[in-house]
Image (tube, rainbow, N blue to C red):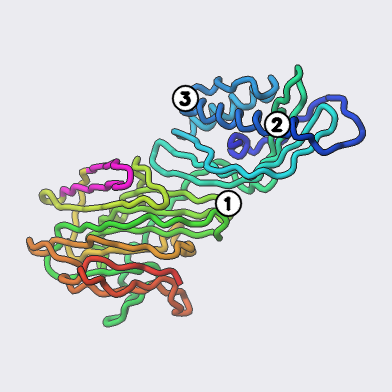
Amino acid sequence: MLITRFLGAGLLLLALAAPVYATQVGPNDEAAIREVIERGNATQMRAIALRDPTAVGEHAIVEYQQRLMRTNRSLLSNGVAGIDLVNIEWGPITIDGTTASATTFETWRTTYAAGPTEFARDRNVYALVFDDAVWRVAGNEHPDSRRGPAAPPDTERDPDPGLDIPAGQSTSSNWSGYAARGGEITSVSGTWRVPEIALDAPFGADAAWVGIGGLRTRDLIQAGTQQIVSGSGTVTYQAWIEKLPEVSKPLPLTVLPGHTVSVSIDLQATDTWLISLTNTTTGQSLLRTETYSSSLSSAEWIQEAPFSRRRVLPLSEFGTITFSAGSAVRDGASLTIADLGARAISLIDNNRRALAVPSPLGLDGASFSVIRS
């Protein structure tokens, strides 16, 4: 059950009599215990969907129902728009007279109204009591939990990503992909598939985006998707936009691993931009009009290790991400990445070891992959 992971609440202590000897639960009791836990999870999903924190059902004892209501209120007040149980794995179930314990490993998807989506896997240790001839949930611990409510960290991107790249070299401390300079760039677009990152992956982050400016300049308008890995069983996915020197802002567009996302940034009039993000997997689209003064000096298609608190975050283990339909408008002409003469950029660490390397451009001149090494 998702609920206590957000509050960090411990197991309810009940003054109940129990036999001295514990026994393995029988098949009928095991089925009943599984059913009441599954019913509780379904009830909580429905309560959040209905935005009714009091809809806790009768699967729990009265004291635990009250805690469930407090937790539901907390979730809703923290901007949670929906929760879904993605997977449940069963551990041991034991009985001790009129009390029981059940262990599950549950993966939950939490959707925030602001746009981010979080996947989290936790070990749950349920306490149950045999009450009025049925099993009911009395408490739930998350003994492996090492954090509180999920909130995407405040991340920002390098304001001078190309300044430390010597002429003729294609390396960067946080960029991997392709970038083109020259002429006046008034539009950029690209498509990619959101990578799936393992829930048990180490702490890190990565961001895929297209942008205008920022290559050897301090201006950059960009939009894309981002993954943030907690290192303790949680991965958050979100769409965002950013206009340097401001920090990135999440967008209310749901993006999940495996979804295909198309992004375009188009100059409409002086300092007026139309930013379009479309999840082609779900059909959901979002349009934003932004005001920004740009040098119009470059176009980028990038997989990045984001910045936070003036340092580059560890690059997540994203595997491979593939960009397609990459193009830009330069001096009024729509051109592919190849037509623009864009150069490849590899992301390296402080020891100049490659961490992410772009492939050669495809035959269409508009596609490539970035491979995490």
Which residue is labeled 1 in the image? Answer: 233
Q: Quadrant of residue 104?
A: top right
- Above or below, 346 against 289 in this view is below
Q: Residue furthest right?
A: 20
Q: Which residues are magenta?
A: 272-288
Sequence order check: which comes first, mark 2 or mark 1?
2
Q: Can you identify the residue that label 2 sits on?
A: 33
Is residue 304 highlighted in magenta?
no
**Sooner in the amino-acid sequence: mark 3 or mark 1:** 3
- Decide if residue 139 is on the left or right side of residue 335: right
Q: Residue at x 28, y 55 (%)?
A: 222
User: Cα distance, mark 3 to mark 2?
Assistant: 27 Å
Image-quadrant location for residue 174: bottom left
Residue at mark 2 to residue at mark 1: CA–CA distance? 26 Å
Residue tagged 3 = 51
Q: Is residue 89 above or below residue 342?
A: above
Question: Image point 17% across, 52% down: which residue?
Answer: 266
Name which residue type carries label 1.
Answer: Gly
Q: Between marks 3 and 1, how big is the CA–CA gap?
A: 27 Å
Nearest to the observer: residue 304 or residue 199: 199
